[in-house]
Image (spheres, rainbow, N blue to C red):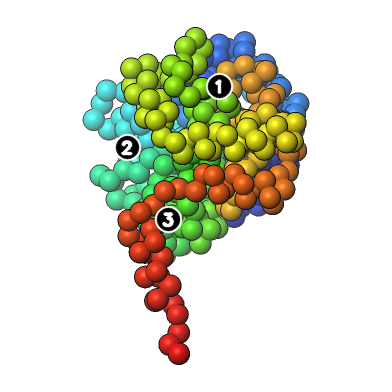
Amino acid sequence: MQYRTLGCSGTVVSTHTLGTMTFGAEADEETSGRIMTAFVEAGGTFLDTADVYSRGVSEEIIGRWLAAHPTDAGQLVIATKGRFAMGDGLNDLGLSRRHLRDALDASLRRLGVDHVDLYQMHAWDAHTPVEETLRFLDDAVTAGKISYYGFSNYLGWQLTKAVHVARAHGWAAPVTLQPQYNLLVRDIEHEVVPAALDAGVGLLPWSPLAGGWLTGKYQRDVDPTGATRLGENPARGMEAWAARNADERTWQVVDAVREVADGRGATMSQVALAWLAAQPAVTSVILGARTVEQLADNLGAADLVLTPEEVARLSEASTPRVDDYPYGVAGARQRARSITPPD
């Protein structure tokens, strides 16, 4: 296992994070416990959850495991999230001071701890002034309930605004951002990655295997069956599968991953994860697992270092398609003219 600092903070975490959205849903408590034990034994130190994962059950499972493994618990960096509705009241969601106060206290109770290392805003809230959210988070840091905070699913301008508002007021600034990022979904490279690099914020990519597409389990024009995961809504999952199946770029990327994996004697999952861990601003890649065996395969990426040629092969095959201004060819020409000095 490799290790990096958590964004611009001084806390060190493993370059692979155990994501626990499956706990209490696709993995029962016994299986979840074995997954956590295997992760720690492999050198993993970073655990990510959220209050909405299985409606709090994920946090409860983690809390009982932490209590039963105090030595291991002391070495783990724990992250959770708040924002989405956990009740039916008008103030049971959002990033208001009122909701976050209740959500954080509830998460601490379920986890059985007096503080978490990283508290993340699960999504932007257009109804709450960003100053209100950031002041609460600064107060939570001062009170010792959280060590750091971060965001999830924020756009580049939202991240930049939050960073500068926090700095202007002298409040604690965010250290991480958790976006969807993988070889099939690279659009954050246009704005989010540059914003994170500018702010010194570390990225914690979720869905690094693109919902299983980068594992090789899907075949062209073959409808998925059996244990193949299509999300909570199978009908919508099939629609999404059909759209991606019809996109030639999908198979171009999958073929490139398979080619590199075959050349290295690695699995496709390990190659896709290794590529992602090598990208700018990435602090730690979130691994979701339903079984210990699945986790073990993914953790094989921890010590896989791709050659520059392999990274280039994967990056070229997965280059995002952008035709319109300001990111396409016309935009690139415009930017080039704006910085080219006169003769």
Q: Position of residue 10 (x, y in %)?
A: 65, 52
Q: Quadrant of the C terminus?
A: bottom left
User: Is label 2 in a helix, a strand or a loop?
Assistant: loop
- Dot 3 crowding, Cα within 10 Å, few <14, some 14–19, many 20+: few
**292 left or right of 197 in image:** right
Residue at image x 42%, y 28%?
245
The residue nearer to you, when weighing 222 against 235, is 222
Identify the amino acid type marked 3: Glu
Identify the amino acid type marked 1: Lys
Q: Are marks 2 and 3 in contact (CB under 8 Å)?
A: no
Mark linked to residue 217:
1
User: Is label 3 in a helix, a strand or a loop?
Assistant: loop
User: Sequence order check: which comes first, mark 1 or mark 3?
Assistant: 3
Q: CA distance from mark 2 to mark 3?
A: 24 Å
**107 left or right of 300 in image:** left
Mark linked to residue 95:
none
Disc 2: which residue: 94
Residue at image x 48%, y 58%?
194
The residue nearer to you, when weighing 295 against 217, is 217
Q: CA distance from mark 2 to mark 1?
A: 37 Å
206 lies above or below 135? above
The residue nearer to you, when weighing 88 against 183, is 183
- Dot 1 crowding, Cα within 10 Å, few <14, some 14–19, many 20+: few
Q: Are marks 1 and 3 in contact (CB under 8 Å)?
A: no
Disc 3: which residue: 191
Q: Which quadrant holds residue 13? A: top right
Q: Position of residue 198 (x, y in %)?
A: 51, 62
Q: Position of residue 52 (x, y in %)?
A: 42, 26
Of badges 2 and 1, the one in the foreground is: 1
Residue at image x 43%, y 87%?
342
Total marks shown come to 3
Q: CA distance from mark 1 to mark 3?
A: 31 Å
